[in-house]
Amino acid sequence: MKIERLIAIIIILLQNKKVTAAMLAQKFNVSKRTIYRDLNDLTLAGIPIISNTGSNGGIMMDENYKLDKTLFTKKELQAIFTGLLSLDSIAADNRYQQIMDKFLSDKHGIYADQHILIDLSSHYKNTLAPKIELIRKAIETSCVIGFDYCGSKGEHQVQLNPYLIVFQWSSWYVLGYEAAAEQFKLFKLNRLWNLKLSEQPFELMDIPQEKLAFNTYFTDTIHAVIHFNKNVKYRVIEEYGIDSCTELNDHLLRFEFDFTNKEYLLEWVLSFHDQAELIEPAEYRQELKARALALYNKYFE
């Protein structure tokens, strides 16, 4: 366990300009005395760690230091690089590239044997990266952020104490405590704008474990049964997997899935035009018919 902690301390020091012994002790659930012994061992091993005392003191790594690649196997380095490259795809600066540079100067062998490439930026990198960067700063400084938000109940302004940036369900979110609602809430980054970082600090709280189970944010389930023309089978499989549908005959597929948002379900069915028919819930069929008629009337009357 100690060697793993020593390597983890090196990684943390490479990622952060300055940390404190108290922060490291809390992270690894050990005493500050243990951390100081670890730092001494690293220094004796030739790791250039700088420690300053005083009000502005802290622990830092010599900025020119690069990790000895013999500390990791090639597969371990590939896993680390995969993670860093994925984060680099949504970074507003080159911090993750700098971390990679600190591992070793010659990365060509690692890049050549990479089997996985993850791009987290989607189509919204130009707007997404600045949001993530500002929220990251707010989390690091424990400062309140404000933004306008458009949700299912309309538009409203939000003041939030941000805790986590979350990538889930192929989208980016910020998890934070909204004082006005007196609860932790999840906000989708693509739905917020006019994001501002205030100088107002907030006091950190423990995040309830149930709030970290992100699937619980969508508790209302709608069991849908839809018949699809086989012409759109590729899209159904792409979005929900091969196990979501079965063949009814040579022309039709039966699709079953539990949705958490009625509006999304109806819009998704309509996006297939005449290639899809909603079977269940039966009460939604009339609403779909009304929407289809409204669309028809808009263009043909």
Image: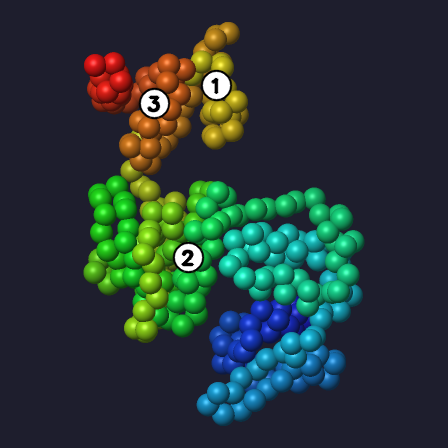
The residue identified by callout 3 is 270
**Above or below, comparing residue 122 to residue 211 in the picture:** above
Query: The C terminus appears in which quarter of the rendering?
Result: top left
Residue drawn 36% across the image and 62% down it: 162
**Above or below, comparing residue 211 to residue 95 in the picture:** above
Q: Secondary structure at mark 2?
A: helix
Label 3 packing within 10 angstroms: few (<14), some (14-19), many (20+): some
Residue drawn 22% across the image and 17% down it: 297
Task: Decide which of tag 3 and tag 2 comes sooner along the chain.
Answer: 2
- Measured as percent of width and height from the top left, residue 268 is found at 37, 27
Residue drawn 34% across the image and 47% down it: 191
Marks 3 and 2, how far apart in space? Answer: 32 Å
Marks 2 and 1, how far apart in space? Answer: 36 Å
- Measured as percent of width and height from the top left, residue 55 is found at 46, 90
- Measured as percent of width and height from the top left, residue 233 is found at 50, 19
Marks 1 and 3, how far apart in space? Answer: 13 Å
Q: Which mark is residue 109?
A: none
Q: Secondary structure at mark 1?
A: helix
User: Cβ–Cβ below 8 Å for labels 3 and 2?
Assistant: no
Single out the mark in the foreground, 3 or 2. 2
Query: The N terminus appears in which quarter of the rendering?
Result: bottom right
**Above or below, comparing residue 153 to residue 284 in the picture:** below
Task: Decide which of tag 1 and tag 3 comes sooner along the chain.
Answer: 1
Front residue (pair 102, 115) = 102
70 left or right, relative to 214: right
Q: Which kind of residue does numbered mark 1 sit on?
A: Val
Q: Which kind of residue does numbered mark 2 sit on?
A: Lys
User: Cβ–Cβ below 8 Å for labels 2 and 1?
Assistant: no
The residue identified by callout 2 is 131
Single out the mark in the foreground, 2 or 1. 2
Q: Which kind of residue does numbered mark 3 sit on?
A: Leu
